[in-house]
Amino acid sequence: MAGHRIFTTSFASIYELYVAKVERKGHTRAEVDQVVRWLTGHDDAGLRQALDEEIDMEIFFARAPRMHPNASLITGVVCGHRVEEISDPLMQKIRYLDKLVDEVAGGKKMTSILREPAARAS
């Protein structure tokens, strides 16, 4: 998938599509921000800077402070591809984010979306 068009698409334009998708389903921009920060390690200032500078997806992920260690727990199908089987690292990161946004739009609980461990019974 080297040189895929999405790599050079601005993060800001994709982000606005994410927000529109979740808002159509009754969810919020804050929820999109939460999953973006969780996955990439960007803080609010870093996220805002990425949006203001209109950097592309490749640069956005290259500048990510750290991918969440539980990102590999994200599984499922996005755009007809199983995210856990995508071989291109950048495309996989993009599809991880797509999957998280899909889960927000679908109304999944945030604890599940963020792959938090289940509370242990006492």
Image (cartoon, rainbow, N blue to C red):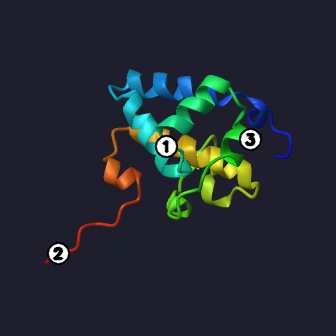
Q: Residue at x 64, y 50 (%)?
A: 93
User: Would you say residue 107 is visible in this rendering?
Assistant: yes
When asked about the image quadrant of residue 105, the answer is top left
Tell me which numbered mark, 1 or 2, is placed earlier along the sequence.
1
* 71 vs 9: above or below: below
Residue sticking out furthest to the bottom: 122
**Which is more foreground, mark 1 or mark 2?**
1
Q: Distance between the Cα atoms at labels 1 and 2?
A: 33 Å
Q: Residue at x 51, y 57 (%)?
A: 74
Check disc 3 and give the amino acid type. Answer: Glu
Query: Could you tell me residue 68's position as x and y percent?
Result: 53, 58
- Disc 2 element: loop
Q: Which mark is residue 43?
A: 1
- The residue type indicated by label 2 comes to Ala
Find disc 3 in the rendering and name its residue.
58
121 above or below 105? below
Q: CA distance from mark 3 to mark 2?
A: 42 Å
Q: Give the structural element (helix, strand or loop) at label 3.
A: helix
Q: Residues within 10 Å of mark 2 (few under 14, many from 20)?
A: few
The mark found on residue 121 in the picture is: 2
Observer-nearest residue: 37 or 110?
37
Kind of residue sitting beneath label 1: Asp
Q: Is residue 85 positioned above or below 97 on the image?
A: below
Q: Is residue 74 above or below residue 6?
A: below
- Pointer 3 or 2: first along the chain: 3
